[in-house]
Amino acid sequence: MNDEKPLSLHVPEPSSRPGDKPDFSHISVPEAGVVRKPEIDCTPASIRDLAYDMVRVMDDNGRAVGDWIPDVDDAFLLKGLTVMLRTRIFDERMFMSQRQGKTSIYVQCRGEEAIACAQRMALSQGDMCFPSYRQQGLLIAQDFPMVDMINQIYSNSKDKLGGRSLPFFYSERDYGFFSISGNLGTQFMQAVGWAMASAIKGDTKVASGWIGDGSTAESDFHSALVFASTYKPPVVLNVVNNQWAISTFQGIASGESANFACRGHGFNIPSIRVDGNDFLAVYAVSKWAIDRARKNLGPTLIEWVTYRAAAHTTSDDPTKYRPADEAEHWPLGDPIERLKTHLIAKGVWDETKHEALTKQIKAEVKAAAKEAESYGTLGKGAVPPVSEMFNHVYKDMPPHLRKQRQELGV
Amino acid sequence: MPEGKVMPQHKTTEKQVSRKNMIEAIRDALDVKMAQDDNVVVFGEDVGYFGGVFRATEGLQAKYGKSRCFDAPISELGIIGAAVGMGAYGLRPVPEIQFADYILPAYDQIASEAARLRYRSSGEFIAPITIRTPTGGGIYGGQTHSQSPEALFTHVAGLKTVIPSNPYDAKGLLIASIEDDDPVIFLEPKRLYNGPFDGHHDRPVTPWSEHELGEVPDGHYTVPLGKAAIAREGSDVTILAYGTMVHVAICAAEETGIDAEVIDLRTLLPLDEETIEKSVKKTGRCIVVHEATKTSGFGAELMAIVQELCMYNLEAPIIRVTGWDTPYPHAQEWDYFPGPARVGDALRKVMGE
Ligand SMILES: Cc1ncc(C[n+]2csc(CCOP(=O)(O)OP(=O)(O)O)c2C)c(N)n1
Ligand SMILES: [Mg+2]
């Protein structure tokens, strides 16, 4: 007798879909301050629990608590608040510009601003980030000229990439910002390679790789962990778990029960899971990982727990696959609001100042957008020369391409 | 659409007919096959609950359940590797790769595995897989949402490559591909999803609902693989085209007044050499049009074949009109895209005008 029952395929489902009440009960949020801060030369095995816990510094009242409180002054935190706010207002403006036909597509990072901004503020000049398309905060945190970002987004006559690349696919080597690729995950492995080069050359520079929760399913993620564990290069491996990959919830990539940080342990890589909407926690853990890397102690894998509060891109309508009010139920709140609350609790900030700052940034962003517009927008006004299309395919244009360019008459 | 010589490609038989755009026709083909054969499974990135970023699989999960239509992790290698395993079991997987640009991580599973499984095992294991993927530009998709990688597949022994140009063919070819026991790369020209885009990006496109080839019979029918269609009958010159370029070619013929015969190849491999030969022998002239880059593109293969079959009937050298040998640019999209003006120039040139 065969008493085996028929098999069935398990397909993970998110906790809620449109029409359901948003449910984040699967995300347990520990008290701020309870997770210990290990020494930077700890063994991966000794901090296994940190991959399952969640480092948080700010409590519900905006007070900083615990071992991970970073050693930074108020001016530094105000700068953090400013660059996060600037990132958000920049995004809002570019979203509008896309709707007005000034560019073809735009991606906001709403709700995730703390991660790129705080980590950039922990990195040094000369370090290199290998971002996905959702880390504009890495540039804005360095006061990168917004008008240059917009020129690229508008593919106008001052787009330094000559109109060849998709909007927001910046490349800014001098700002430690590797050229963005549309092919998911590729940059994660490249970050490890760059860090290996830094070690090969006896340099002191650190690489920072970035990948989304969904993209961790790509082989590049797994290759990156293998190489990082083998060669122990100076690299920070960031997984931005914003819960969604277009319409696909993170459980399809993580296998539901596991998280992303714990994947590092199979590779003997120190791995930490962090409240990604807590600017202080993001800065502190980034700093810890960067210091480790710089002291030749090797890679760190960090899962930043956050929420993609906006649509995937301007082409996406998230109400088709998740409850419209899901963002409001996100248990880790909003990164800007939380840092603001902290600074107010500290007595160094208030609503009036915040309003004034918001107003000032809006004016700055508007001025940058207006200036960029005067150099053209996608297909309107001053545009990059058509001949730009043939540039940079090779260092020297081969004869066949020259012929094609002549055929087009440009 | 120009009237007169544009050929009806099918006769509407006794069957009920519905007006469909290309996405609806593709969804209908999947629906017909999923209803008919429970070995047909559909999966890929965002294809389950959401129904795909182009909505081709909308409603299929609700109708057939989560084990027949489901979301996949973002791993193209995983998606195609899984399809190979499922095919070996006896299923007929129809995986979707969200954009043809993202098929490269799966290239090893396609070119070394799916394509050769039959050969390697003397037919003991097969890969009856149909890989659907949107191809081509025209949507300001830049380098990573615009490419036309057909030649990467026609170059691989063991694969079939199909590319429809209208809703009627899309449905019939997709059903034929799913029923085929060999792996098929099914390229969907995304610029044609809503209408027969002719390259005039500054004009609104006629919706398929107003086009004869938007009439799609209900239920099961096939358009056989390996059979080209004459999309426009003509006597001066033969234009070999497929996908979006079929409509661009027809438009160029109408605009130049040159009586071109436009052949819609529909299947690139196996190729309908007979139809090509007959047409070129009739017209004595040939141009080849594709959106993909020129060098080592499928156009080179077509030129070689025409030369082999029709050398002594040719009254002028064959001309290729293609995308330039650059990555697909964002802002210069319409200078890259081989539109009706460039095809028209080639027509005049081949006619000695
Ligand atoms: C290789 C590859 N496959 C598929 C896509 C299409 N795609 C673009 S973004 C995206 C979702 C990515 O989600 P995630 O990694 O979680 O990053 P997020 O958008 O949430 O920042 C998909 C499937 C792509 N760009 N590249
Ligand atoms: Mg995500």
Image (tube, rainbow, N blue to C red):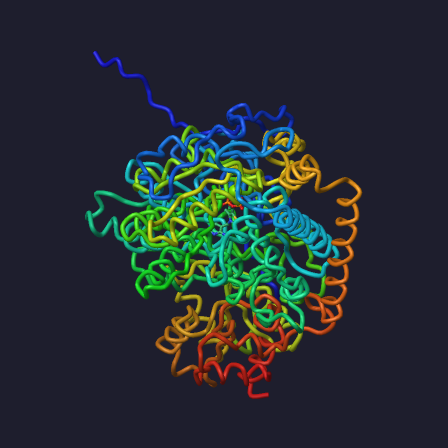
- Image location (x, y in percent) of residue A191: 41, 56
Image check: B4 left or right of B310? right
- Image location (x, y in percent) of residue B291: 52, 67
Image check: A331 left or right of A98? left
Q: Quadrant of the N terminus of chain A?
A: top left
Image check: A244 left or right of B90? right
* Residue sitting at x 32%, y 66%: A201
- Image location (x, y in percent) of residue A111: 62, 41
Residue B30 seen from this side? yes
All told, the count of numbered labels is 0
Residue A243 seen from this side? no
Above or below for B247 versus B182: below
Residue nearer the viewer, B137 or A385: A385
* Residue sitting at x 49%, y 75%: A392
Q: Quadrant of the C terminus of chain A?
A: bottom right
Above or below for B126 versus A183: above
Residue A301, by quadrant, is top left
- Image location (x, y in percent) of residue B52: 54, 42
Residue nearer the viewer, B223 or A323: A323
Q: Residue furthest top?
A: A1
Image check: A370 left or right of A1? right
* Residue sitting at x 48%, y 67%: B292
Above or below for A256 versus B249: above
* Residue sitting at x 44%, y 71%: B299
Residue nearer the viewer, A251 or B314: A251
